[in-house]
Amino acid sequence: MRQSSMNKDFERCVRNKRLVLQGHVQNLIPDELSAACADLMRAKKTFREEDYKWSTIQAYYSMFHSARALLFDKGYREKSHICLKYAIQELYAEQGLIEQEYVDDFDVTMLLRETADYNSDFSKEGAGTAIQNAKSFLKRAKELLKQ
């Protein structure tokens, strides 16, 4: 079986302690899903208020917390946003547990958040995409975690 570049990225994150195995993180899953729901609700509210920058950022953080819940279910803790993406790719998509589109949506939404946050480059369309991605990702995470 050939090793994917994502697998190498995952391994690098583990080697550099940006992803660490940690006991009892499964206990944190409900709090992460709760944070994901709260951030999604705030993203929708700020979208209605036409604050597309914050809506984009909040939608991303909803996805971030959903992804953390998935990661915690595998016993890992992240110390890097990009390593979180690599972990979801390796532990879920590569294993056939989650469809690749969710990892791709996480990547897109992470980029939307970064450009909104660091470059003040955002739009109504981008915020809408981020919210839709966050909503779908949270729903899928809950299904996988049977929450």
Image (cartoon, rainbow, N blue to C red):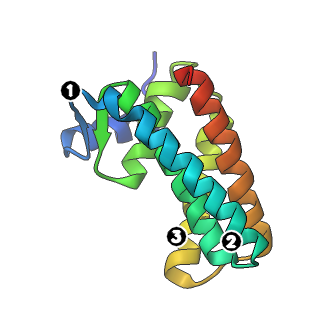
Residue ID at (58%, 19%): 96
Image quadrant in which the C terminus is located: top right
- Classify mark 3: helix, strand or loop: helix
Disc 2 packing (10 Å; few <14; some 14–19; many ≥20): some
Q: Which mark is residue 46?
A: 2
x then y, percent, for residue 139:
66, 35
Q: Residue at x 41, y 33 (%)?
A: 29
The answer to whether residue 88 shows anywhere in this view is yes
In primary-sequence order, the first of circles 3 and 1 is 1
Q: Looking at the image, which is closer to me, 9 or 56?
A: 56
* Residue drawn at (63%, 76%) of the image: 53
Q: Amino acid at mark 1?
A: Gly
> Mark 2: which amino acid?
Thr
Picture disc at residue 114 = 3
Against 11, residue 133 (above or below) is below
**Residue 38 in the figure: left or right of residue 105:** left
Of tags 3 and 1, the one toward the viewer is 1
Between disc 1 and disc 2, whose residue precedes?
Answer: 1
Question: Where residue 23 is drawn, which disc sits there?
Answer: 1
- Labels 3 and 2: the sequence-earlier one: 2
Give the image location of residue 78, x and y in percent: 31, 44
**Could you give the CA–CA distance between mark 1 and mark 2, rounded to whole angstroms?**
36 Å
For residue 4, say whether it is visible.
no
Q: Tell which tag, 3 or 2, sits nearer the viewer.
A: 2
| In-image side of 64 versus 51 (left or right) | left
Q: Secondary structure at mark 2?
A: helix
Q: Residue furthest bottom?
A: 120
Of all residues, the one furthest to the top in this rendering is 1
| Marks 3/1: CA–CA distance | 31 Å
- Is disc 1 surrounded by few (<14), some (14 to 19) or many (20+) residues within 10 Å? few
The location of residue 35, given as percent across then percent down, is 49, 49
